[in-house]
Image (tube, rainbow, N blue to C red):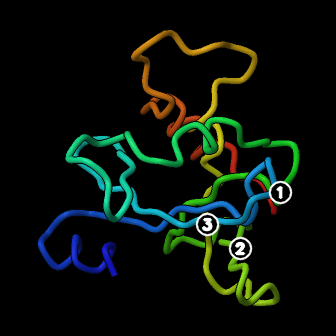
Amino acid sequence: LLVNACRAAGIPARAVGTPLWTNKTGNHTWVEVWDGKWHYLGAAESKVLNTAWFTKQAAAADATKPVHRIYAACFQRTGTHFPMIWSRRDWSVPAVDVTACYTRKGKERKRGQEPFSAQNERQAQKTPEKA
């Protein structure tokens, strides 16, 4: 609903989610909005972008396991699908693997450093993987 509301207001938006957190406490889907780069937000979080209750869990995503990756829905056929946990056999929604946008492989983030970056987004766009 929030993706559609943003789009209706002229704000580019997309659905993003993970089929299963690495701590196996469930799945989650959220929204990213575009203002020159993608920013994530939850439906009921503060007014600050890239800050949500799920930030730490998203940073712990595991790109080596498709079930623990983070995917962004898109219109272009990429060879990757947006995993819908409620309809596991439905591969009709194309996606981009954006796990690297939320994690820093082998590097600890410095205090205040965003886990999500435009550089990681560009890298994710270059190397879509099959889920």
Kindly indicate whether the residue at mark 3 contacts the one at mark 2 (C-beta within 8 angstroms).
Answer: yes
Q: Which residue is mark 3?
A: 95
* Label 2 or label 1, whichever comes before in sequence order: 1
**Residue at the disc numbered 2:** 83
- Kindly identify the residue that appears in the image at 60 percent across and 65 percent down: 28
Where does label 1 land, which residue? 66
Sooner in the amino-acid sequence: mark 3 or mark 1? 1
115 on left or right of 22: left
Residue farthest to the right, as pictured: 65
Work out whether 116 lies above or below 105.
below
Secondary structure type for disc 3 = strand
Callout 1, which amino acid?
A: Pro
Residue 77 lies, in percent from the top left, at 62, 72
The CA span between labels 2 and 3 is: 9 Å
CA neighbours of label 3 inside 10 A, class few (<14), some (14 to 19), many (20+): many
As drawn, the residue found furthest toward the left would be 9
